[in-house]
């Protein structure tokens, strides 16, 4: 069954919010880490989202793909930039990353259709 990535992201957001209630110190620290790592610096937030997307593909993390496709588009990443990111992830992760790269293409198309 195909994943509907925007709905998958919404579902995970709810679960992450619940984790925030259950383990607030851990989630607050992770939020601070995320904000610091994702902020503009020598690399733009768009470039950082593309890096995160490539890592999500290579690590085979569906939820991460849902988040980082959304956030890369929000940061201004183009379809072409995300396609090149998929290519680098395939280079680094081989056949399994090819499968997740194909899933990422589906996620990109779903988000761009919104």
Image (cartoon, rainbow, N blue to C red):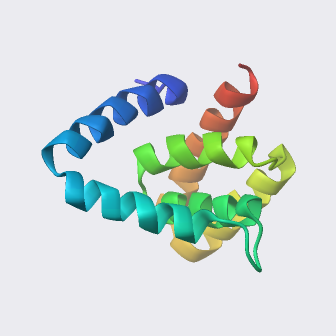
In the rendered view, would you say 51 is above or below 1?
below
The quarter of the displayed image where residue 21 is located: top left
Total residue callouts: 0
Residue 48 drawn at (x, y percent): 67, 66
| Residue 79 vertical placement versus 10 (above, below) | below
**From the image, which quarter does the C terminus lie in?**
top right
As drawn, 62 above or below 95: above
Is residue 97 left or right of 43 when viewed as pictured? left
Say which residue appears at 43% left-offset and 29% top-offset. Answer: 8
> Can residue 59 be seen here?
no
Across and down, in percent, residue 71 comes to 64, 45
Which residue does the image show at 60% across and 64% down from the upper left? 38
User: Which residue is painted at 21% across and 51% down in the image?
Assistant: 24
Residue sitting nearer the eye, 63 or 16: 16
Work out whether residue 98 can be spotted.
yes
- Tell whether 14 sits left or right of 38: left
| Outermost residue toward the bottom in this view | 42
Task: Identify which residue is drawn at 40% across, 23% down.
Answer: 1
| Residue 58 screen position, x and y as percent | 50, 65
**Is 48 left, or right, of 33 in this rendering?**
right
**Residue at the top extreme, as displayed:** 114
Which of these two is toward me, 99 or 13?
13
Residue 30: percent from the left, percent from the top? 36, 62
């Amino acid at each position: 069954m195909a994943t509907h990535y925007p709905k998958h992201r919404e579902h995970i957001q709810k679960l992450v919010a619940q984790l925030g209630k259950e383990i607030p110190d851990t989630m607050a620290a992770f939020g601070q880490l995320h904000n610091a790592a994702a902020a503009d610096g020598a690399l733009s937030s768009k470039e950082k989202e593309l890096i995160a997307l490539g890592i999500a593909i290579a690590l085979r993390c569906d939820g991460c793909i849902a988040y980082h496709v959304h956030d890369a588009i929000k940061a201004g990443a183009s379809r072409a930039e995300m396609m090149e990111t998929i290519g680098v992830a395939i280079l680094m992760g081989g056949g399994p990353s090819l499968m997740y790269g194909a899933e990422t293409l589906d996620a990109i198309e779903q988000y761009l259709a919104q």
